[in-house]
Amino acid sequence: MNKYGAEHLQDHRFTLELGEIERRGLWIDVRLNLQAEPGQVLPEDLSDPSVYVICNLEGTIVQYILLDEGCDSEFMFTPAEKEQIAAFIRQHCGASIKSLSGA
């Protein structure tokens, strides 16, 4: 998690927990709660981070959004962090996404 425009990207390790999944037209919205892994520190400018992921009806992730206190933030995920989120969604949300998509 790094501010947009940062010169040096730093990966952060975190745990995820499913918040909610809902269908919105042609999209599936996934909200995840995010906590720093034990011994890890998240960027100090983030007070209550969470993840908002938008998937198409096939379950492909089209956007990752890092929220702070429920609002869009000035931070973005690194490629490694996005992969951690994608793996969580594949493992824990795939069946729900498939059900909501009507497939």
Image (spheres, grey):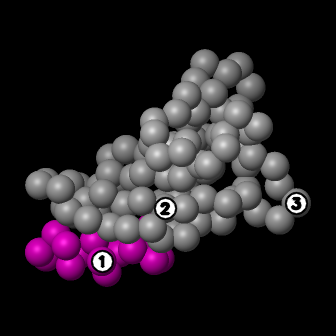
Q: Is 3 in the magenta?
A: no
The residue depicted at 81 percent of the width and 49 percent of the height is 41
Q: CA distance from mark 3 to mark 2?
A: 21 Å
Q: Is 97 in the magenta?
A: yes
Amino acid of disc 3: Gly
Q: Circle 1 is placed at which residue position?
A: 96
Residue 69 drawn at (x, y percent): 54, 45
Q: Is residue 63 left or right of residue 74?
A: left
The residue depicted at 63 percent of the width and 27 percent of the height is 3
Q: Is residue 97 left or right of residue 12?
A: left
First in sequence: mark 1 vs mark 2: 2
Looking at the rendering, in which quadrant would you find the C terminus?
bottom left
First in sequence: mark 3 vs mark 2: 2
Q: Secondary structure at mark 2?
A: strand
Q: Secondary structure at mark 1?
A: helix
Identify whether 41 is placed above or below 103: above
Q: Circle 2 is placed at which residue position?
A: 32
Quadrant in the picture for residue 10: top right
Q: Read off the magenta span.
A: 89-103
Magenta stretch, main secondary structure, is helix
The residue depicted at 32 percent of the width and 67 percent of the height is 21
Amino acid of disc 1: Ser
Amino acid of disc 2: Leu
Which one is nearer the viewer's eye here, 2 or 74?
A: 74
Q: Circle 3 is placed at which residue position?
A: 39
Residue 93 drawn at (x, y percent): 39, 74
